[in-house]
Image (cartoon, rainbow, N blue to C red):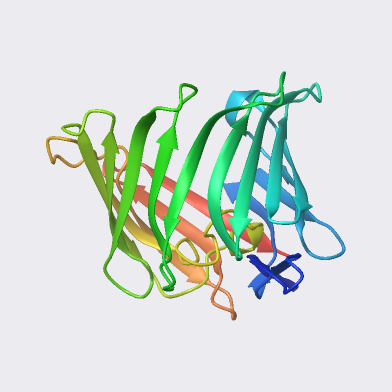
Amino acid sequence: MFVISSCSLNDDNSIVINDALLVKSISTNGVLTESFVYDDNDHLITRLGSYELGATRIEFEYEENLITYNYYNDQNELVRSLENHLEGGVFTRLDEIDVNTGDVFAYRLYATNSSTCNLDSVTYFDENQEQYLNIEFDYSDQNCSAEILLIDSNPDNRSRNITVNDGKNSAIKSLGYAFYDTVFAHNRLSYTNYNDANEVIPEISYSNEFTYNELDYPITETRTYGDERIVVYSYDYY
């Protein structure tokens, strides 16, 4: 087994990583659904699966204070591009890039703090630079279990999620996405989604049961939804 780290910065502003086990693949109900490739420095460079806009592959590029995610379809056409910006080792902004012009057409801003659960809110802006969604996090324990409030452009339209996390390691801790090594570093034992009428949405809400390896990373995750669907995820590591 190999370990990697999620993103922080050296004194020279190069991106480095804190210890995390390298996830190799994820299967859903016994079928391989995602796989992950790393370079010689254990940075994630390729993610294979099914993604937005028909993408089947994500390529990662690392620069000083910047990680770029390029999404390609089976025809090797670039269909989506994101740029995640860091300051002082913390993610601050994610830009959605127009793949035809290279211009930023939408973005989100991260508000952070210096605690273990270091994400306060995420604010989304559209192509007109207008805010259309704000997500606020209110944490309840050191595992970053939280009440998450979602407010769209109409302040009266609110929904919320309640998450309960374990104290063990997330299978995808090594991927280097924003806050995967802090707020999202653990596994969700339950996720309860409420609509703006404060009613639970059963087809989205779920509870999880895990089995773990000797390093406290999940091997299997059995997810039971409120509508009684069951999905089993399996994790393999390098």
Looking at the image, which residue sits at the far right?
Answer: 40
Q: x, y (%) of residue 19?
A: 66, 75
The N terminus lies in quadrant = bottom right
At x 36%, y 75%, the residue is 142
In the image, residue 188 sits, relative to residue 204, either above or below, namely: below
At x 35%, y 50%, the residue is 224
In this view, the residue in front, 99 or 35, is 99
Left-right relation of 234 to 142: right
Left-right relation of 107 to 197: right
Q: x, y (%) of residue 163?
A: 31, 57
In this view, the residue in front, 179 or 125, is 125
In the image, residue 232 sits, relative to residue 153, either above or below, namely: below
Q: x, y (%) of residue 187?
A: 45, 63
Count numbered badges in the picture: 0
Q: Quadrant of residue 5?
A: bottom right
In this view, the residue in front, 186 or 216, is 186
Observer able to see residue 36 = yes
Q: x, y (%) of residue 155?
A: 20, 34
At x 67%, y 38%, the residue is 49
Looking at the image, which residue sits at the far top?
Answer: 100
Looking at the image, which residue sits at the far bottom?
Answer: 214
In the image, residue 89 sits, relative to residue 27, either above or below, namely: below
Observer able to see residue 29 = no
The C terminus lies in quadrant = bottom right
Left-right relation of 135 to 99: left
